[in-house]
Image (tube, rainbow, N blue to C red):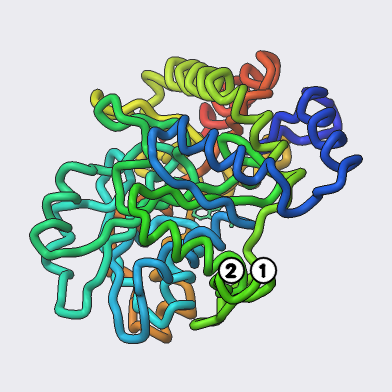
Amino acid sequence: MLNKKKIIPYGHQWIDKKDIKEVVKVLRGDWITQGPNVERFERAVAKYCRVKYAVAVSSGTAALHAAYTAAGIKTGDEVITTPLTFAATANCIVFCGGKPVFVDIQKDTLNIDPKKIEEKITKKTKAIAVVDFAGHPCDHDEIKKIAKKHKLLIIEDAAHSLGSKYKDKRIGSLADMTILSFHPVKIITTGEGGMVLTNNKDFYEKLKIFRHHGTIKKPQKGGWYYEIEKPGYNYRLTDFQCVLGLSQLKKIDKFIKKRREILRRYNKAFKGINEIIAPTERDYVKSAWHIYPIQLNLGKLKVSRKKIFEELQKKGIGVQVHYIPLHLQPFYKKKFNYKKEDFPTAEKYYERAITLPLFPKMINKEINKVIQIIKKLIKPYKK
Ligand SMILES: Cc1ncc(COP(=O)(O)O)c(C=O)c1O
């Protein structure tokens, strides 16, 4: 997709002719919203992730909102989570009236540090919301032990990690509920879209009701009849989005293979450059690598991260930063009294982080361009 005028984005969808053909077929038919492809897509993702139930919703954010609601998170409850995540992971806890209780991250995986979880558990703690940062699964075994001991639910924000494996098990059935996002930069896309996966029938029923205004059908009282015990939302995903998801899912292995290949090429190219810290993968994990976040070893450089970031953008590399730790956001500071230096590992990562382009449709020329520009840029700034 290299185009001289265009910047190389940090992430990008890969929509092919088959995807378009499938979507157009649905658009020409009778069902463009709640048609047969919704259940087909749910069944296909559930099968791929080896989990019993799946509920398609309109975004990863809707999936988080639905999962926390099904988990019973309500006013006054606390949910333990990581500060190094996209806002939705914590925002949705707040939507339910809960408090996100942040726990610092591990230096290598950049995921929540299980060793620091127990000291944050109180009588109000109801759940642990883990995030598989960049695609790297969190420490499930350790986290499960803690959750079991304290009777807490685990909600896995797998927006980055569809297709990732933890000890040979694909994510999807490792937590009580797992949420996915199908935003265009994610592993597969439906435009906007998301899903909740679970093996728990009770959660499954609650999720479906919540997605559809809170309505519970009572056919014994008439074909039209339903009751609302608690208002829900319209969080439905359309039939044409689901057919796109089905078509994308057929290519997921190819997508992940390509993502892992690009990561290997970057890591090889940056090996031996002490100014760059590349992402790593633990040996019992296989990450789908949603993003490629590097850290600048600022102690070895004469310039700031901001300068490198801006120069990369000027040179056509569409870099990003994932993420500003949530405890530093004005809302979380004001509402929950978080402050700078609360989570030093997350802050240190953030101050040095830059996400480089990584997406399956990246061509060799683009990968080489990123590597060359980075190497050239860093050289004169070495201390
Ligand atoms: C970790 C994480 N959680 C949740 C979301 C929300 O997903 P969506 O954009 O589909 O609402 C995102 C999206 O970027 C994410 O990265």
Q: Residue at x 60, y 44 (%)?
A: 39
In the image, residue 118 sits, relative to residue 253, either above or below, namely below
Q: Quadrant of residue 252?
A: top right
Q: Quadrant of residue 89?
A: bottom left
Ligand 1, what quadrant? Answer: bottom right
Q: Is residue 101 left or right of residue 371?
A: left
Q: Residue at x 69, y 43 (%)?
A: 36
> Residue extending furthest left?
149
What's the residue type where badge 2 is placed?
Answer: Pro
Q: Tell me, for residue 223, which label it has, or none.
A: 1
Give coordinates of residue 182: x percent, y percent. 60, 45
Q: Nearer the viewer, residue 107 or 46?
A: 46
Are the residues flagged by discs 1 and 2 in contact, CB closer than 8 Å? yes
Q: Is residue 194 left or right of residue 129?
A: right
Q: Nearer the viewer, residue 230 or 273?
A: 230
Q: Quadrant of residue 334?
A: bottom left
Callout 2: CB less than 8 Å from ligand 1: no
Q: Residue at x 71, y 29 (%)?
A: 14
Residue named by callout 2: 219
